[in-house]
Image (spheres, rainbow, N blue to C red):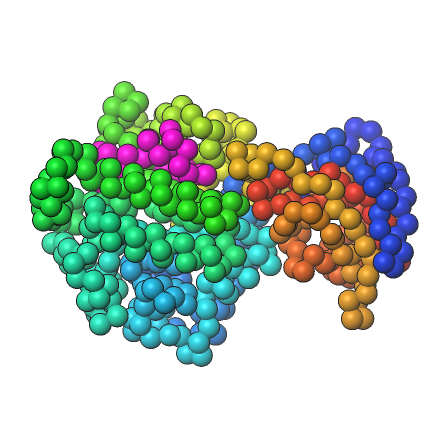
Amino acid sequence: MNHILLKKSPILLFIFLYSCSTINESHLVDSAALPAVPREFRAAWVATVANINWPSQPGLPVEDQKAEAIKLLDFLRDHHFNAVIFQVRPQCDALYSSELEPWSYYLTGAQGSPPEPEYDPLNFWIEEAHKRRLELHVWLNPYRAHHTAGGEITEHSIVRQRPELVVKLKNGMWWMDPSLKETQDHSYNVVMDIVQRYDIDGVHFDDYFYPYPSYNENLDFPDSASYMAYRASAGKLSRSDWRRESVNTFIKRLYKGIKKEKKHVKFGISPFGIWRPANPESIQGFDQYEQLYADAKLWLNKGWIDYFAPQLYWPTNQIPQSFPVLLNWWADENTKGRHLWPGINIGRLKGDQAIDEAINQIMISRAMLDQSPGVIHWSIGPLVKNDSLAEKIFSGPYRQEALVPAMDWRSPKRPGPPRVYLQQSGSFPVLHIDAKSEFKSVVIYYQNDSILEYKIIPIENSEIKISDLKSLIPDSRRILLAVVNRFGQMSPTVLVNLPE
């Protein structure tokens, strides 16, 4: 239960609320004067590539797909997570209705074939996530054209539709050439189409930019033709710098595009956890700068993202790739003050060791990132399969509900106080909340003996049924209510007396 102990008796103010009447603004209580609701990003990745997490198999009946999704989302809500990172483009395909790319093989078992009966999985996930006060971030792979687990290459595939944009790797995958403007335009348009048409909370990329060298038997990425064309046009960059510049240009363009369309939609990237070996000095390992051509440090330094989630998938005591050492280094590079929420691998270790390491990494992140804590769990699979792990996280660091930290650099201004009306909606009395800025949730404080407790409640159509509210707080007549806008900013709180 979410609660805050009070050293003094709470303010006891009575405001009588009649049908179609409003709360007088003289009865506002600034939420800054109340004990703060915890802020922490608590997310899990849901992978669709190779049907890792959802759906459990290609071509699963639609009702079974929905039931599996509900089970995952219920799990996140019940364990006090507040976000889900949902993979909607595992290759150049779509787990949503798109005119730019074909329906995914992982969804229907046949690339280009819609689900039957037809529905939009992304809309379904968004609506169900928001009902459970979860943010939904769409996760896309920007350059992978076809995965070896992605079924046959059909006439709908970009490999057939745009063969000039793709190359084949030795492991059988197909990859778009990131240096080509047409590649960048296509992936940009795919992202912006989702931003424009769907009520998402974030856009998310992982660590796949240029492919890992092992995908091509450690041979160089086959882009000689495009590099020679670049040099022939008086280009002077080395091939490595030219590749990095192509990715940098795309990342910067996409961040600006998202913000121009919808300022509240977050852009997050989860790069490989090491920028370059010896950064810091004790760190050893893979060089993403020189082998994935991902200058992740630059993106963080420039503030071209809203949150950064380096994949710190190693244990705390693994000296060459130590979790706290790497997290501290990335924190020092966060010169623009963006959210830094590391990715943690909760499935790498087993038994009690896995539980201890997961909780330790959550607590280390809280201590080191105290102004804006959070982690992303890779992936939801180990959580739902390991009851002991999930329970220990829930009863320990996630015991209380938490709000997602606010994006102060996008909207530092808190929303104004809401006006609250008691109305009838059909046969049900409801609290109608009128706020000047768009909001997705409310925070309710209520009194329980000497404890001031709170709940975070999702909102649809700006209304809360009185019956629903009383089922959540059955013994309370007085509440303090605040709205939380799309940037995570919380309004001043109004006091409300609930009707009999």
Q: Residue furthest bottom?
A: 117
- Residue sitting nearer the eye, 303 or 136: 303
- The stretch of residues the image draws in magenta is 286-312
**Which of the image's four quarters has the C terminus?**
bottom right
Residue at horizontal 38%, vertical 26%? 333
Residue 412 image position (x, y, % from top left): 59, 34
Left or right, 430 with reference to 379: right
Residue 387 visible at all: no
Q: Is residue 252 above or below residue 57?
A: above
Name the residue rendered at 22%, 72% in the picture.
155
Membership of 294 in magenta stretch: yes
Percent coordinates x, y for residue 91 in the rendering? 29, 58
Magenta run includes residue 221: no
**Which residue: 14% across, 33% down?**
236
Q: Quadrant of the N terminus?
A: top right
**Is residue 160 at least partly visible in the picture?**
yes
The image shows residue 171 at horizontal and vertical percentages of 14, 55
368 shown above or below 305? above
The foreground one among 396 and 423 is 423
Q: Name the residue rendered at 78%, 60% in the picture.
A: 430
